[in-house]
């Protein structure tokens, strides 16, 4: 499955690395964990002069043929929902001298299905569990601080012409069909259902929200610890001054972000670590084309001055 997915991504213009490895505390011991695929696209695609990078982390879950993944839509009204448009594809320009349009990745989320929970259902036996879904989501979430820190460390010290903004997105990919429960689902409707299709409808992909746990916050601090020193460098202060002159908010200056990412008592940074795409393998080509389309338009929005 991983090899098939890698070939799809290469055909779509990405460069592939297998087993993106990151360190994580496990019962007091630091161990290496990994996500199956790291795919890097240089934006705009098919151009020798790239203006931004697009990073996809893809965790693959090959499941038995009879298994289906059932998700439950977010029941919150819009104003109270934890989901935020534009946070699934994270567009990060804070560590460069150019600016994305503030809403450049919102179109990806505009028609998305936001879900609060997912379970795996074995259609042949009726067994229901969520361990594989939770494990895959955790693998991706815990990899994100290292991916973010890697991009910051790579770009910020670079020459101004080589310091580019970046977009990143985590994807949990499965061979199972995805279904989303109908809004009127109830205990009674489940008890009277003959098949999953009686209570749910198919979906190409869904988006889930993960709150940062205290353990994850400690992991973030460790993964981003090196950014605290980067925040003190003269080049970072110069970048602060440039972005401040452009009207950037103080809490979004690069030195402030680097310091807070490395600080256990800093803010939660849900904009970087909360939303994850879950997609079925059948519809993965459609997903990566949609991501490419939104990312390409985002690059066209890049300006040398902050949008007012």
Image (tube, helix red, strand yellow):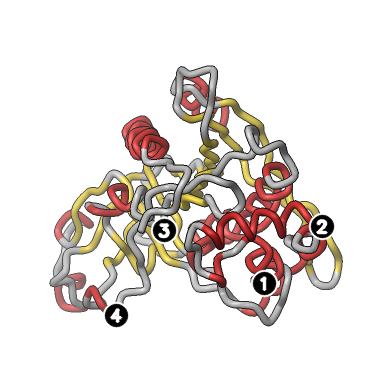
- Crowd band around label 4 with a 10 angstrom C-alpha radius: few (<14), some (14–19), many (20+): few
Q: Which tag, 2 or 1, sits closer to the chain's start?
A: 2
Between 46 and 160, the one lying in front of the other is: 160
Q: Which residue is mark 3?
A: 87
When the figure is inspected, residue 281 is found, relative to residue 272, above or below; the finding is above
Q: Earlier in the sequence, mark 3 or mark 4?
A: 4
**Of marks 4 and 2, the one in the foreground:** 4
Q: Which residue is mark 1?
A: 260
- Disc 2 is placed on an element classified as strand
Q: Position of residue 21 (x, y in %)?
A: 73, 46
Alpha carbon separation for disc pair 3 and 2:
29 Å
Mark 3 vs 2, N-terminal side: 2
- Check residue 80 in the rendering and tell me which mark sits there, or answer none: 4
For marks 3 and 4, give the CA distance: 16 Å
Q: Is residue 124 visible?
A: no
Q: Mark 4 or mark 1, which is nearer to you?
A: 1
User: Which of the 4 image quarters holds residue 40?
Assistant: top right
């Amino acid at each position: 499955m991983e090899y098939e997915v890698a070939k799809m991504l290469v055909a779509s213009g990405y460069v592939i690395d297998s087993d993106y490895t990151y360190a994580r505390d496990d019962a007091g011991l630091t161990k290496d964990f990994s996500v199956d695929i790291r795919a890097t696209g240089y934006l705009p695609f098919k151009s020798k002069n790239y203006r931004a990078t697009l990073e996809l982390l893809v965790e693959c879950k090959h499941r038995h043929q009879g298994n289906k993944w059932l998700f439950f839509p977010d029941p919150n009204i819009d104003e109270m929902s934890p989901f935020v448009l534009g946070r699934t594809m994270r567009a990060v320009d804070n560590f460069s001298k150019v600016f994305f349009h503030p809403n450049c990745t919102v179109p990806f989320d505009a028609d998305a299905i936001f879900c609060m929970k997912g379970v795996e259902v074995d259609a042949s036996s009726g067994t229901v569990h969520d361990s594989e879904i939770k494990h895959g989501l955790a693998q991706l979430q815990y990899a994100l601080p290292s991916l973010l820190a890697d991009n910051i460390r790579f770009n910020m010290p670079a020459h101004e012409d080589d310091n580019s903004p970046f977009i990143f997105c985590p994807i949990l990919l499965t061979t199972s069909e995805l279904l989303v429960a109908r809004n009127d689902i109830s205990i009674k409707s489940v008890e009277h259902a003959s098949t999953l299709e009686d209570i749910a409808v198919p979906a190409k992909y869904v988006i889930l929200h993960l709150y940062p746990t205290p353990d994850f916050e400690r992991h973030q601090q460790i993964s981003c610890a090196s950014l605290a020193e980067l925040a003190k460098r003269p080049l970072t202060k110069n970048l602060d001054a440039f972005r401040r002159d452009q009207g950037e908010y103080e809490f979004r200056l690069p030195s402030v972000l680097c310091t807070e990412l490395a600080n256990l008592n800093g803010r939660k940074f849900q904009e970087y670590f909360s939303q994850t795409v879950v997609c079925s393998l059948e519809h993965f080509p459609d997903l990566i084309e949609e991501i490419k389309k939104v990312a390409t338009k985002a690059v066209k929005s890049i300006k040398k001055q902050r949008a007012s």
